[in-house]
Amino acid sequence: MLILASQSPRRRDMFDRLRIDYLAESADTDESIAESVTPDDYVKILAHRKGQAVLDSHTEDDYIISADTVVALGNTVYGKPRDFDDAYAMLKSFSGNTHKVYTGFAVFHGGKCYTEAVATEVVFRPLTDREICYYIEAEQPYDKAGAYGIQEMAGIFVKEIRGSFDNVVGLPLTAVEEALQREFGISLFDFAKSATVS
């Protein structure tokens, strides 16, 4: 069985688009991390914690995939905004700048765990205060790292991306597939739903 250890509707949508059979499951985890930790280590540590949190309720035959995403501008790491003001401050800091989106993922199977982090550069055009306020009020992006979803209205803020688009959404599918094949000898499509003939 394939388990997606995530509460993120974006990650679940990505698995749904692949038309694979999976079970979405998540558990509360401690997301406190020392400030000295680099963004790529930050997301790998949290992805591991999230997978570990659901591991005990499954067998070693299951495949568990977990992930965590943050946004970094310079040395500052941005998670999910606490409120309107926090979201506004995040988007204002990205305006006219290039930031990086880091997603770490972990795969658990057969007593083994593999973790990896992927980074994508995102260039924002300069944003007006009106655009930022309108976006926050319309989208309520409080469940999104960096206070925006590139696949939604905030796509109009993005001038350029360098790297994986899926990574910015919340899961670098190509890297996950490559890791599954290389480390575990299996593909996401081995979990494909059976085709039905009508």
Image (cartoon, rainbow, N blue to C red):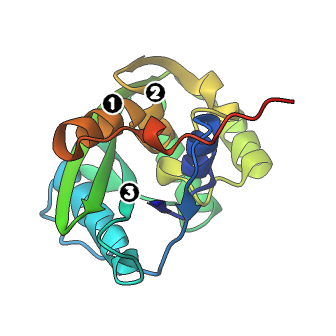
Which badge, 3 or 2, is on the more N-terminal residue?
Answer: 3
Question: x, y (%) of residue 58?
Answer: 40, 77
Extreme front residue here? 197
Label annotation for residue 144: none
Q: Nearer the viewer, residue 72 or 194?
A: 194
Q: In the rendered image, which residue does mark 2 sit on?
A: 165
- Residue 148, above or below 77: above
Question: x, y (%) of residue 1?
Answer: 46, 61
Question: x, y (%) of residue 69?
Answer: 39, 51
Q: What SS does tag 3 mark?
A: strand
Q: In the rendered image, which residue does mark 3 sit on?
A: 65
Q: Nearer the viewer, mark 3 or mark 2?
A: 3
Q: What SS does tag 1 mark?
A: strand
Which three-letter amino acid code belongs to the residue tagged 2?
Answer: Phe
State how far apart marks 3 and 2 are (Cα). Answer: 19 Å
Q: What SS does tag 2 mark?
A: helix
Q: Is residue 94 visible?
A: no
Q: Nearer the viewer, residue 77 or 46?
A: 46
Which badge, 3 or 1, is on the more N-terminal residue?
Answer: 3
- Residue 194, above or below 115: above
Image marks 1 and 2: residues in contact by CB distance under 8 Å: yes
Extreme top residue here? 160
- Residue 8, above or below 198: below
